[in-house]
Every structure is written in structure tokens, then in C-alpha cells.
Image: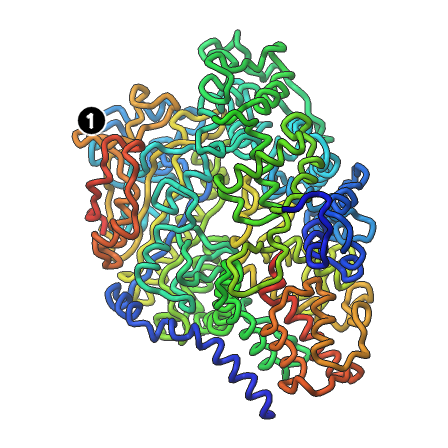
């Protein structure tokens, strides 16, 4: 059993870096090994609050800007991982919103709050123009309230349909009442939300709709439930709804939203085994207690409690085959950003083009891999783990790997130069393979048999023969081919 | 080729061969299953978001009941007028004249040829209003319990398909949960033409060795007992195999069926393009192209979550646009297959995760319960089956939706969607009812369905 004082071995340091930033460079691994879990977490979380907001007239541009920002030297990697998590959590798609400006603004909001108060963030999301557009808040009218946002607020952003004990968290009546609270919210052209009382559903006007009362059957509030117009009817109702939701308790007495968010974040940082309620429940309960998340709602504290826990290091092992231990599959955005950062590549120009092969925008690569940023497939966000890996999305990864590794012409900061990441005077096939694997951030993750395959490839089946990387064909053909193979390999799809 | 390279390739072949024994052509179960099923294809089309069934199959008059009056009571600005609806048959219970949404001219044409079955009032007990939960229940054929296998995936498992077979294709980046299972490979692709393996065009001499190394890495992963490595290995392996066998289907179809291709081109919609890819694969299978044996397909049409701006029957309105795309594309697809001589060999099932609320909201509709399912094909007995949902105000539940009911004497009883799946499996794919019940469609908890309908399923619905 480890804790925050446990010292990181090399494999654990690499694991920590791969999960909390985009890829692990060999020098970064060396610098972190020997530090404690707590030191590593504090260092990763110690970034200042950022209000960075992207521009871009078209969403492809904005997507490209995000990838460039993720991979920039000065960007805190963990900040962007948390923003990705929150983007998936509060999934909003530009396919519906149709405003790159509003999407960028929402992205900035997630960044501003990513290690701060989750409840305050939820209240801001209530008033976020992109979300209001996406889930029909702007089309919610007193005459017949639209349930879209109310339902997803409960089902996806906070409580979940059922708690970790399998019991329902809310009823259809709760959805209907909460929909009433959101009637009358609109935004002005700048995106700033405002409340229009003339469109708001009031008790006086609609007495048959009953009290503005929720959670009379579930949530641990007793038969009286909670009224959300207890501070008067009008604009304050949507904040009171959030307050009550965040007080909602599971059938075993734990604060529902705290434990559910903890469970999601555990799955995000650890592995898919924690998607199962019974498996994640004790751990989620533990990290909520350790971090005080159910009181402070501080995402940074919750993240730290996970990053120092044994569970986080479960997938740090290096035995790829024959082992039943959990592994986790990388998100496309992580795969792309890690590859770019490790190879020292910057997507080119306004449209963030990746040279070589398909000559595609980075956003197109991401789309083909199944993760268009700012365009999640639905309000449920993306499906994680094995859902990332289909023939379509894997082929897209293989194409991307081929493109970045074999682009031989283009702007110098956008094409891969092997000399930047490894020693080209090496002559031993095994040493060259090790250097490439290390540069790709997956050192130690290949089995001996896999390594042999790579050596056989590099040496054309003569593993003992010296390899001359000063030979143009060898360097430009074999070495780049080796990088492509490593990036395409099964091991490199793990995170 | 030098000797060492040959040795390397042999090793690779041996690694791949470990799985090769389970391949399609060497597998007697699969061979038998295919013989049983005949030369048959099955397509699942999912209307994603919850289709408004009430504005899809709409009462034109009251018949012996009050269907049209009730419809007009609840649908005000979203009302489809009696003159714009495309009349089909009458409701089996009330005799009310029914009509299709005015944009569904494609469905109307198929109906008039007796190739479209409308099965009304389909759903499942204790319906869910959550997109996610309801979709998963339809996709898995059971109350979702966290397991990732789909009802059709369990069929594929029971048929004995192995990891290197590719019995199904999803026209998407993700594999639809209907096909979910861990025994065999479903290829997900968007465009056949661009599905080729990404070689380094600057060094073509290296293609063979590089591909051999790639295949060796993925064969090792496929043999791994570690679940995520196993998934990577089998999916990556099937991807590489399909990247060789599938791209040529594009050119084959273009050469043989250029005129039909132009027809899809003219529709210029996403769904038309997806269905054309399916037609290309079916053409390839029918022509006996080696390595292409997919007979089961899944495709989605997104955008049916019409909470707002639904737009009744107005041309250019949201629901109209969706229905126009679906009806036109399916009609062309059916005619294409008929022209290939395969009309009798294809069956398309069109469904959505739920109907929408009987009472409209301001200018759209919220989530509802049971709705119509459509079955299309040359082997389908066209017509209207099951009673229209009872939409009289008194019949609605406290959520404003029609309840799922199975009382034997209830004339408005619902049709359980598992009866439809079972009918397809039994009458289209030749599976035995016992296997369907034991292996494919699981039973319900009596808590969810007090009438225990599911103890007496009906896999002999007359539409097939």
C-alpha cells in the first residue's frame, strides 16, 4: 500500500507523466523518478488559474489552436487533461451551437474552473451561451417548458440516472419542475445570459403545475423535498436548483454528485474497470472523504487524492502479454497531442496542417479517430476505453502515425527530424529500437518479442548487423518506418 | 529477397496463423450458418434521437375511435393536415385511415409495392425517457445491466463467427452496440475507398516488410490474455485485413453499377452515401470477392431529437428534412438491390430509441414511449401491423405518454420490440426459437413487466 510519500520508480514516473500531460519525454521521466507521489501531484497541479480563450472564425481553426496550445512548452499538461475531462462531462457540440466563439468561451470557462469549484462551474454552465443553445434553454418557454436541459443536468452533469447502489436519483416529476426553473433564460448577442421574467413560468400563472418542489421521493430530503423558489421566484431559481442537487444524497447517505464525479474522474485517470459501480464505489467514497470534495467541491483537491492513490498506479505495470491486469486505451486527443509533443512537431499555419501522407488538418485526424473536439457525438460525450478502438478509428491512427513520421518536406517546425529526439550515431539495431521507443514515450512498455519484431524490421532480418543511420535510405526509409511502426503499435495505443 | 527476410515473414505467418484456424472459410459452424441463412442480408437503420412517431404514421380520420380528434387536440402548431399526409392503409383496431409524413414519399412508394411493413406501438416495459438508457435497451434487447453485448452481437456469437471473420460492418467510426460482443470482428468504416493501409509512399520497396512487422505485432496482441491488448490485437488485425480486401469494392461497384452510383450522388445526403457504401459491399459479396463476407450492416441517421423547431410537415422544416433524407435514400437503396436481383435477399429494420411526447411543447416535442418500427424488403409482407397507440387524454400515463401494456384482452396492447427481433432471427435468419430465447433475447424481471408477457414471446409476427 502506497501513499503520497511513496517514491516513484522510473516506470511510475513515466506513467504519471503520460496521464497528467501529453506524453513523457525521456528527460522528464528521469527528472521525476525518485520524487514522491505527493510531490509529483503538487507539481502537476500547481499551475495558476488560466483564462486562456481561443479564437478562430471556423471551428476547425479553434480545434487546431487547442492542439497547438496543448502541446506548447509553457502549457500545464494537467490543466488541459482536466479541460478535456470537463469538455466530455459538459459535452456541447458546435454541430448544434454553430458558434466557434461561444465554444471557445465555454472552453475558457472550463479552463478557468478546472481545478476549482465544481458547483460554481455548474452554475456558470447553466448560463453558458453554447450550452443554452445546445440543450434548448433558449427555447424553453413558460407556455410548455422544454425538458431537455433539466434532464441532462440531472442525468449527466450531476446526479446520474441511478446512484452507485443502483437506485434512481430522480423522477420525471423532478425533471418537469426543474424545466420550469429554466424558463425565460436567453442570451444577448455577445453571449451574456439574461433572465426574461415575461417568459418565466410562475406559480401564479400556472397553479396546476404544482409547487416548485423537487426530490420529494429521493435524495434524502424527506417527503417535503426541496423548494427551489425558496429565495423567491425568478432568476435565483436555477442557482437554487443546483444547490439542492449538490445536497442530494445516495441511498447509503453519501453526497451523490460528489461521489459520481469522483467515480468519473477515477475512471478518467485510472482505467475502465472503474466504470462498474460496485468496483468504483468504495474508492470514490474514499477519495471524496480524503479530499473533502463534497464540501469544498474543489476539483484540484479531488484530482490530488486520486493521483496519490494506489489505484492510479495500477496500470503503471509493464507486462503487456498474458497478464490480466488492467490497461487503459488512449483518447485520440491524447494520442495526437502526445505524438506531436514528443516528436517536436507543431501543426502548420492557420489551419493546423499535418504534413505528409494525407496532408490533413489536425482536426480532421482527430475527427477520423473519433474525437472531434468541440463536436462530441452527443450530450453523453465520448465513449471511452475500447469504444475508441474500431477499425475506422484505428486506421485513422495508423494514417496519422504514417503522416507525422514520414513527412520529408514542409515547414521545418512541422516535420519530424529524427536527429531532434535521438542519437543518430547509434549502430546497434536493439539500441536504435530502444531509443525510438523511448522517444515515443513508451519505453519499457514493449515485450521482448515485440522488440525483436522491430529489430528484425529495422535490420531487414539481420539483427546482429550494424545499422548505418548516416545512409540516406536507412535513415529516411527504415528509421522513419520504425517510428511509424512504434506509433502504430498496440502498445502505443495504451495510455 | 534475402534469406533472413524470408525467415522473418515466415515467423509472421506463423503468428498470424494461430488465429487463422478460426477464419471464416475453415469454420464449419459459420459455413453451416451461412447456408441456413441463405443469401441474405440484414440492415439496421437507427433514427437517432427519438423519432416523433405520431408525426410519422398519423391518423387522417377517427375510424371507429377518436384518433384524429385526439391528435388534433395535442398537436396544434405541429399538426399535419389531412390533405398533406400520404395515405397508406387503415389502423387494424379502429379502422382509422393512416398517413405517412408528407416527406416520406420514399416509404409511400415502397408501401404501395407491398415492400414496407409498419409495426405500430413498439416498445418495452417500464420505458425510459433517457436517450442513453432507452437506446441501450433497444440495442441490447434487455434492461441494460452494464454488459456490452448487443442482441445482434449475441446472434453472431451463437453462429460461431471467429475473430478474423468480418460478418458485419457499421457505417460509422464507432461500432453500434447492437453488434457488441467479443467473439468476432465488426468493421467500422465511413468510406470504403479510403480504407487502404497507410504505406509510406516514399519507400514502396519497404511495404511488405513493414506490413509484416505490423501484422506480427498485432497478432501477438490478439493472442494476449490481457483484455485491452486482446481488443487492440483483434480490431487492429481485422482492420489491416479489411484494408486489403475492402477498398477494391469501390471500383468494382463503379464499374458495374455506375448509373446507380450517380443516383445516390444526386440525392447528395449522408444517409444516401452510407447506404451506397452498403450496396457496394453487398455487390462485392454477391460477386464472390475474396475476403469480403459481411452480411449485416448498421447505419444511423442523427438529428431526431426534435425538442425544438420540429416544423410539422413544412418543407425545409427539421422533421421534414430528416424524413425526406431517410425515405428517399432507402427507396433508392431498395431499388438498387432489386436491380442487382437481390430484393428478396435484403431486409431493413428502421427503429428509434423512443417516440415523442403526445402533447407538443412550444414548437417541438419531448421524450415519449412506444413508437412505430418499419421493416423493408422484397421478402417483407407489406402492411400495417398492431394498433396505433391510444392517444386519448385519459389513456396517457402521468408523464403524458402511452403506457406499455400487454393485457391479453387489451385491444391497444403494445408490441414488445423483442418480438420483432425474434421474428427477424427466426424467419429471416433461420434461428430456432429455443436458441433465440436462451441465447439471444434474455427474459425480463417480473418487476418490470407484471403481465409477464415475455414468458410467451411471439416470434411469428406476420410481417416476415
Query: Does residue A81 lie above or below A353 as drawn?
Result: above
Residue at the far bottom: name it: B2
Residue at the image point whose x is 64% and y is 50% from the top: A313
| Residue in the foreground of this view, choosing between A479 and A278 | A278
Q: Which residue is mark 1?
A: B64
Residue A126 pos. (x, y %)? 63, 27
Q: Is residue B189 visible?
A: no
The quarter of the picture where the C terminus of chain A appears is bottom right
Classify residue B126 by image quadrant: top left
Residue under the point 47% across and 73% down: B245
Picture residue at 51% right of the left edge, 58% below the top: A324
The percent position of residue A425, horizontal first and vertical second, equals 82, 79
Relative depth, front residue between B12 and B199: B12
Most extreme residue toward the left, as rendered? Answer: B409
Position of B215 with respect to B404 (left or right) is: right
Residue B381 higher or lower than B246, as above or below: above
Image position of A323 with respect to B404: above or below: below
Please, which residue is most extreme toward the front here? A1
Residue B413 percent coordinates (x, y): 24, 32
Q: Tell me which chain the residue with mark 1 is part of.
A: B
Residue B277 in the image: x percent, y percent?
A: 45, 62
Amino acid at each position: 500500500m502506497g501513499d503520497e510519500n511513496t517514491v516513484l520508480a522510473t516506470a511510475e514516473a513515466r506513467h504519471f507523466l503520460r496521464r497528467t500531460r501529453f506524453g513523457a519525454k525521456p528527460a522528464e521521466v528521469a527528472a521525476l523518478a525518485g520524487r514522491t507521489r505527493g510531490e509529483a501531484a503538487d507539481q502537476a497541479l500547481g499551475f495558476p488559474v488560466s483564462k486562456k480563450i481561443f479564437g478562430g472564425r471556423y471551428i476547425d481553426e479553434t480545434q487546431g489552436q487547442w492542439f497547438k496550445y496543448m502541446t506548447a512548452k509553457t502549457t500545464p499538461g494537467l490543466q488541459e487533461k482536466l479541460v478535456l475531462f470537463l469538455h466530455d462531462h459538459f459535452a456541447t457540440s458546435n454541430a448544434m451551437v454553430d458558434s466557434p466563439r461561444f465554444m471557445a468561451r465555454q472552453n475558457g470557462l472550463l479552463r478557468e474552473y478546472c481545478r476549482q469549484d465544481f458547483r460554481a462551474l455548474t452554475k456558470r454552465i447553466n448560463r453558458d451561451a453554447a450550452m443554452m443553445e445546445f440543450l434548448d434553454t433558449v427555447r424553453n418557454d413558460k407556455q410548455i417548458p422544454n425538458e431537455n436541459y433539466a434532464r441532462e443536468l440531472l442525468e449527466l452533469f450531476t446526479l446520474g440516472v441511478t446512484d452507485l447502489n443502483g437506485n434512481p436519483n430522480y423522477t420525471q416529476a423532478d425533471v418537469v419542475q426543474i424545466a420550469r426553473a429554466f424558463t425565460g433564460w436567453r442570451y444577448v448577442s455577445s453571449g451574456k445570459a439574461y433572465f426574461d421574467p415575461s417568459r418565466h413560468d410562475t406559480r401564479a400563472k400556472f397553479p396546476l403545475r404544482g409547487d416548485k418542489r423537487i426530490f420529494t421521493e429521493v435524495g434524502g430530503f424527506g417527503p417535503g423535498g426541496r423548494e427551489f423558489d425558496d429565495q423567491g421566484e425568478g432568476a435565483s431559481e436555477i442557482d437554487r436548483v443546483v444547490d439542492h442537487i449538490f445536497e442530494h444524497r445516495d441511498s447509503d447517505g453519501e453526497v451523490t454528485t460528489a461521489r459520481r464525479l469522483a467515480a468519473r474522474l477515477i475512471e478518467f485517470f485510472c482505467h475502465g474497470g472503474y466504470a462498474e459501480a460496485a468496483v468504483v464505489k468504495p474508492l470514490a467514497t474514499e477519495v471524496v472523504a480524503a479530499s473533502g470534495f463534497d464540501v469544498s467541491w474543489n476539483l484540484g483537491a479531488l484530482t490530488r487524492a486520486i493521483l496519490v492513490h494506489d489505484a492510479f498506479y495500477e496500470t503503471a505495470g509493464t507486462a503487456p502479454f498474458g497478464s490480466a491486469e488492467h490497461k487503459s486505451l488512449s483518447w485520440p486527443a491524447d494520442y495526437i497531442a502526445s505524438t506531436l509533443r514528443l516528436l517536436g512537431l507543431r501543426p502548420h499555419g492557420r489551419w493546423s496542417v499535418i504534413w505528409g501522407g494525407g496532408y490533413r488538418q489536425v482536426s480532421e485526424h482527430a475527427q477520423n479517430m473519433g474525437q472531434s473536439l468541440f463536436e462530441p457525438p452527443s450530450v453523453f460525450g465520448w465513449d471511452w476505453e475500447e469504444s475508441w478502438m474500431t477499425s475506422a478509428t484505428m486506421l485513422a491512427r495508423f494514417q496519422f502515425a504514417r503522416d507525422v513520421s514520414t513527412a520529408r518536406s514542409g515547414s521545418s517546425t512541422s516535420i519530424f527530424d529524427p536527429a531532434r529526439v535521438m542519437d543518430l550515431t547509434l549502430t546497434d539495431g536493439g539500441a536504435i529500437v530502444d531509443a525510438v521507443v523511448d522517444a515515443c514515450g513508451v519505453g519499457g512498455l514493449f515485450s521482448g518479442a515485440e522488440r525483436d519484431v522491430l529489430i528484425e524490421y529495422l535490420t531487414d532480418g539481420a539483427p546482429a548487423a550494424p545499422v548505418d543511420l548516416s545512409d540516406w535510405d536507412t535513415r529516411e526509409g527504415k528509421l522513419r518506418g520504425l517510428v511509424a511502426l512504434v506509433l502504430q503499435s498496440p502498445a502505443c495505443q495504451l495510455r | 529477397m534475402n534469406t533472413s527476410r524470408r525467415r522473418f515473414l515466415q515467423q509472421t505467418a506463423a503468428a498470424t496463423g494461430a488465429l487463422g484456424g478460426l477464419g471464416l472459410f475453415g469454420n464449419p459452424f459459420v459455413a453451416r450458418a451461412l447456408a441456413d441463412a441463405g443469401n441474405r442480408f440484414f440492415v439496421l437503420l437507427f433514427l437517432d434521437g427519438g423519432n416523433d412517431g405520431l408525426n410519422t404514421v398519423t391518423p387522417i380520420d377517427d375510424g371507429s375511435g377518436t384518433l384524429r380528434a385526439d391528435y388534433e387536440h395535442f398537436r396544434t402548431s405541429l399538426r399535419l393536415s389531412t390533405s398533406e399526409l400520404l395515405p397508406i392503409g387503415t389502423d387494424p383496431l379502429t379502422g382509422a385511415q393512416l398517413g405517412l409524413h408528407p416527406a416520406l414519399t420514399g416509404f409511400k412508394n415502397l408501401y404501395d409495392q407491398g415492400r414496407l411493413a409498419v409495426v405500430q406501438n413498439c416498445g418495452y416495459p417500464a420505458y425510459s425517457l433517457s436517450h442513453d438508457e432507452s437506446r441501450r435497451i433497444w440495442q441490447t434487447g434487455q434492461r441494460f445491466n452494464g454488459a456490452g453485448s448487443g442482441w445482434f452481437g449475441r446472434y453472431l456469437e451463437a453462429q460461431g463467427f471467429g475473430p478474423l471473420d468480418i460478418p458485419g460492418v457499421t457505417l460509422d467510426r464507432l461500432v453500434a452496440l447492437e453488434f457488441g460482443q467479443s467473439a468476432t470482428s465488426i468493421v467500422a468504416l465511413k468510406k470504403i475507398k479510403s480504407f487502404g493501409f497507410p504505406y509510406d509512399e516514399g519507400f514502396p520497396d519497404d511495404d511488405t516488410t513493414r506490413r509484416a512487422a505490423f501484422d506480427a505485432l498485432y497478432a501477438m496482441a490478439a493472442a494476449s490474455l490481457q483484455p485491452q491488448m486482446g481488443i487492440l490485437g483483434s480490431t487492429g488485425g481485422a482492420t489491416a485485413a479489411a484494408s486489403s480486401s475492402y477498398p477494391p469494392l469501390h471500383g468494382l461497384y463503379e464499374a458495374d453499377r455506375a448509373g446507380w452510383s450517380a443516383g445516390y450522388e444526386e440525392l447528395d445526403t449522408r444517409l444516401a452515401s452510407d447506404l451506397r457504401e452498403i450496396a457496394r459491399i453487398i455487390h462485392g459479396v454477391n460477386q464472390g470477392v475474396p475476403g469480403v463476407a459481411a452480411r449485416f450492416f448498421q447505419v444511423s441517421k442523427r438529428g431526431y431529437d426534435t425538442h425544438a423547431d420540429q416544423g410539422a410537415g413544412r418543407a425545409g422544416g427539421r422533421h421534414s428534412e430528416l424524413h425526406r433524407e431517410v425515405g428517399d435514400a432507402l427507396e433508392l437503396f431498395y431499388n438498387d438491390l432489386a436491380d442487382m436481383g437481390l430484393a428478396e435477399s435484403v431486409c431493413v429494420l428502421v427503429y428509434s430509441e423512443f417516440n415523442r411526447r403526445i402533447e407538443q411543447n412550444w414548437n417541438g416535442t419531448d421524450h415519449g414511449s412506444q413508437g412505430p418500427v418499419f421493416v423493408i424488403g422484397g421478402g417483407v409482407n407489406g402492411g400495417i401491423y398492431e394498433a396505433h397507440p391510444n392517444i386519448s387524454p385519459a389513456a396517457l400515463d402521468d408523464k403524458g405518454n402511452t403506457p406499455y401494456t400487454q393485457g391479453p384482452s387489451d385491444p391497444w396492447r403494445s408490441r414488445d420490440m423483442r418480438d420483432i427481433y425474434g421474428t427477424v432471427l427466426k424467419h429471416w435468419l433461420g434461428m430456432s426459437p429455443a436458441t433465440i430465447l436462451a441465447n439471444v433475447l434474455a427474459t425480463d424481471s417480473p418487476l418490470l413487466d407484471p403481465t409477464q408477457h415475455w414468458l410467451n414471446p411471439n416470434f411469428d409476427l406476420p410481417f416476415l
